[in-house]
Image (tube, grey):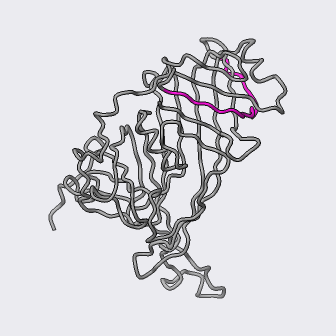
Amino acid sequence: MALSTAFQTKQNTRVIIGTEVTMGTACNEDSGVTIEMPVTDYSFDEIHKHSLSVAPPRTGSGSLTQSDDMVKFQRHDRMFDISITFHATAQAINRVCGALYGDDDGTNTLIGSMPSVTHFKDGVSNSVPVTLWFENSSHAGEGTDLFFTSCICTGLTLSGDISSNGGVVMATATFQTAYQPTEAALTIESTSSANTSISEQLTMFNMHDLTVETLNEQDLLLYSFELAIARPVNRIGFDNSSNFKPMGYSLGGYEVTGSLTCKRDAESLEAIDTDMSVPKALALSAGDVFQIDAPKVYIDGAGISMDDDGWKQTIPFRCTYSGATSSTIVAIKTA
């Protein structure tokens, strides 16, 4: 057989998130809205992912070597991992927040009562799982795509650094699915009115545009920040007559953590030193364009970075809520 001339490159791949109608059925142009993500990097598991389960060897002379009946490859518990890194545009952030915790209206508020639903079932109407489509990413190369069905968003990390990426705020979203990936042409048209294209995402959030940088009502000179929202997902059961698809997913609770790096001065000391047992408010804002508000932040220790351009305060933190479960843990406002 002749050597294949097919190949794939990242530069030839669009990444699209599609809203599903029924869990276990991929999105297409007739059954859900889509958004082309402003992706700069991505990764995903190989489509034939499985693990080997090996029985221990028997004891006794002549039986210490493993025979083939002691080895079995398993697919009943597999989860495919996908990660995308992208420019933090309003539309992209809104879409991922919708997938992660169900609020995508521009306020993107995570509250104490989320998630309101803790499990999803295969074959049931559900708009939370998404289809992730990677154009031209099949083994056949250009012209055939790779898509992952019914992906659950497991995390979103926002990060900004005034000395990196031109100050552009970057985001990384992680997903998992228990469904076998598919190599085929998926009918999502970038010109469809239900699709948000790259050309429509004109505003990228930038560190240099921040006008409010406060912790505990103290003004900070901020060099960088990171905010991470994460939650676990577990597959439930399997159907070995249908490529080991899951019977459903169970979802865990959210954990919100982050860190700040700012100039070390009297304000940074006041921000972290006033009664460490009491939560503090964090606010980052570029006016009406981009805001991060976390009303109840606990400082998780603090450190010093003794750099040549001045000493910096490093402030790791954890976001919580207090009082009613309708209270805000964090809001990522894009409008």
Instruction: Label the magenta part by its dominant secondary structure.
Output: strand
Relative vertical location of residue 102 with respect to residue 308 in this rendering, above or below: below
The stretch in magenta equals: 290-306
**How many labels were placed on the picture?**
0
- Where residue 211 appears, as percent x and y from the top left, is 55, 16
Q: Quadrant of the N terminus?
A: bottom left
Quadrant housing residue 257: top right
Q: Residue at x 48, y 50 (%)?
A: 99
Quadrant housing residue 240: bottom left
Relative vertical location of residue 25 with respect to residue 44 in this rendering, above or below: below
**Residue 130 as seen in the image, left or right of residue 102:** left
Inspect the magenta stretch and tell me whether residue 55 lies in it: no
- Where residue 307 appears, as percent x and y from the top left, is 63, 16
- Where residue 53 appears, as percent x and y from the top left, is 54, 75
For the residue pair 326 and 40, the one nearer the viewer reads as 326
Q: Residue furthest left?
A: 2
For the residue pair 334 and 264, the one nearer the viewer reads as 334
